[in-house]
Image (cartoon, rainbow, N blue to C red):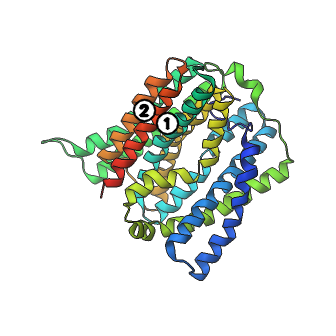
Amino acid sequence: MNVAHVRRRWGRAATLKYLNLLLVLVPIALILDLTGTGGHTIVFVTSAMAMIPLAALLGQATEEVAGYTGPKIGGLLNATLGNAAELIITIVALREGLVNVVKASIAGSIIGNILIVLGASVLFGGLKHGEQRFDARIAGVNATMMMLAIVALIVPAVFARGDATHHLTATDLEHLSDGVAVVMIVMYALYLIFTLRGGPGAKGHHQEAAIPGMSLPLAIGILAGSTIAIVVMSELLVGAIEPTAEAWGLSDLFIGVMLVPLVGNVAEHLVAVRMALKNKMDLSLAIALGSSLQVALFVTPVLVFAGILLDQKMSLVFSSFELAALVGASVIATLISVDGRSNWLEGAQLISVYLMIGLAFYFVP
């Protein structure tokens, strides 16, 4: 089972032990919403916090089910459901017509995984172990795929702006976005085949596949239950986004880029840092970069197709702010990861870029 797609159990049990305490917020959020107590802001905060343990449970259940299916199918299952919580949130938001928030959350998730998750892992791992090493071949493949994903996101925006003599119609842009989405998801499928069938470094990681720790019916039950709960919490979260943004004086763009992506990925972020502290940088990078690739090449085209079904057309025309942040994040992450070595200063550099981007988005009206 390839490291680039499997959310490892190491460190997850310890993380879940504390995160599960937040499950009490699930009924609290429901009660607050049904009774209208506290207003939209408190519903937004409680539902967002409740999503954290639910996403962690969903990830654990996915791993457990994958343990019964064999390494290749298990790897595919993990690769498909690795960002299920975030996908559910964005589909609910898309259904409600919050297209700009959805696109902002896509950009924010990619940026956050590259800069915050990878940055914190490299920083804390470097402070504890000094210079750390990882497989440069795997990092090189991931970096190339990430640059491909960024190009795919740039192309519709560039052609949407056109020049003095060439302008695409709205219909043309929709068709262009649909075509690019098809290419993206095909490339992601090829990437999965390449890594699961023996891409660089894959052979040495097959033995790390998780052994199931619970029965299959229980794992499936937790998977189904956590998914339903995430759908319900997503409804509450999305319904409170706009009034909360207005109450806090924040733009929908800032909430989409900086806040929403953190909700479904906190548990995974903590696991990535724990792997770095254990000097397992291959796993740490796989979580950070692999998750970014999944959002860019799988979640994004799925949302484009979902928009067609929901009659909420979502083009891949991102704003100049989002594109600048994506390009900057991917370039610096590539420069840091391709040499097979990392140190704490590089982690601080990644985090500093994230802080600058966050500050910039805060001032965007």
Is 265 rendered above or below residue 36? above
The circle drawn on residue 350 is: none
Is 100 rendered above or below residue 126? below
Q: Earlier in the sequence, mark 1 or mark 2?
A: 1
Outermost front residue: 127
* Residue 313 is at least partly visible in this image: no
Give percent across and percent down for residue 278. Answer: 69, 29
> What's the distance in space between the residues labelled 1 and 2, CA to CA?
7 Å
Q: Are marks 1 and 2 in contact (CB under 8 Å)?
A: yes
Q: Residue at x 59, y 52 (%)?
A: 264
Residue position marked by numbered label 1 in the rendering: 114
Q: Residue at x 42, y 64 (%)?
A: 97
Q: Secondary structure at mark 1?
A: helix
Q: What kind of residue is marked 1? A: Ile
- Front position in the image: 348 or 212: 348
* Residue 40 is at least partly visible in this image: yes
Q: What kind of residue is marked 2? A: Ser
- Say left or right for 3 vs 315: right
- Front position in the image: 62 or 284: 284
- Say left or right for 307 vs 286: left
The circle drawn on residue 330 is: 2
Give percent across and percent down for residue 187. Answer: 50, 32
Asked where in the image residue 69 lies, by quadrant, the reply is top right
- Say left or right for 169 vs 130: left
